[in-house]
């Protein structure tokens, strides 16, 4: 029984240390961010020195655009500053909700003027004696109703995407500045997960 307990303790320790590892590759070098994660989750942080202080926790605010192998995001830094950064090697699970949210916002923005144009077209045309004009008016009315339903679905999807984005970013992610800029934007690297 004692041997079984010892083996279980050793396996538990190996498993716990494997979970704590977060291996990333930056500039061809492999780094273990496990100690940073551990330090961030330890409550009395002020008593110990932060390991790898150049790795910072960032929180995404808004996706702006793709740019040369990375993404431009508005982010909130550890000290509360809001700034735009070019982020490379961001995990797809963190990136996807923010990109999806931006795409929904763009679709809504494109649909609203179309709805207004259709409403204006209907306002300027009443029933007519011409069969074609009545048919055309009905077509515009049908399109307007379809566009309003689509807008409603997009708005609901936008709300869901915003919730998902907030949920995914609740704890932030680690990245480090590589002390370079592109197009006037500081470049931050999350490292490629191993």
Image (spheres, helix red, strand yellow):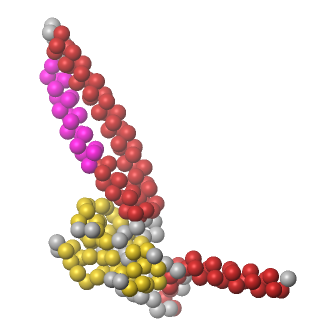
Foreground residue among 184 and 81: 184
* 114 falls in the magenta region: yes
Q: Residue furthest top?
A: 129
Q: Quadrant of residue 54?
A: bottom left
Q: Residue at x 48, y 88 (%)?
A: 46
Q: Main secondary structure of the magenta part?
A: helix
- Figure quadrant of the N terminus: bottom right
Residue 145 on image: x %, y %: 30, 28
* 101 falls in the magenta region: no
Q: Which residues are magenta?
A: 106-125
Residue 122 as seen in the image, left or right of residue 17: left
Q: Residue at x 42, y 88 (%)?
A: 52
Q: Residue furthest right?
A: 1
Q: Residue at x 50, y 91 (%)?
A: 48
Q: Quadrant of residue 64?
A: bottom left
Question: Is residue 56 something one can see in this rendering?
Answer: no
Residue 134 on image: x %, y %: 20, 14
């Amino acid at each position: 029984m004692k041997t079984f307990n010892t083996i279980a303790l050793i396996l538990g320790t190996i498993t716990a240390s494997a979970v704590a590892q977060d291996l990333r590759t930056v500039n061809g070098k492999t780094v273990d961010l496990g100690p940073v994660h551990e330090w961030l989750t330890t409550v009395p942080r002020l008593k110990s020195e932060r390991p790898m202080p150049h790795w910072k926790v960032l929180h995404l605010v808004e996706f702006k655009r793709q740019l040369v192998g990375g993404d431009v995001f508005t982010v909130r830094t550890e000290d509360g500053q809001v700034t735009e950064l070019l982020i490379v090697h961001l995990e797809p699970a963190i990136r996807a909700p923010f990109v999806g949210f931006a795409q929904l916002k763009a679709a809504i923005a494109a649909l609203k003027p179309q709805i207004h144009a259709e409403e204006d077209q209907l306002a300027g045309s009443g029933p007519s004696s011409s069969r074609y004009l009545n048919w055309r008016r009905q077509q515009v009315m049908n399109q307007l109703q379809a566009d309003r339903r689509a807008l409603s679905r997009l708005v609901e999807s936008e709300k869901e995407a915003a919730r998902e984005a907030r949920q995914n970013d609740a704890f932030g992610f680690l990245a480090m500045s590589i002390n370079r800029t592109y197009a006037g934007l500081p470049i931050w690297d999350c490292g490629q997960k191993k």
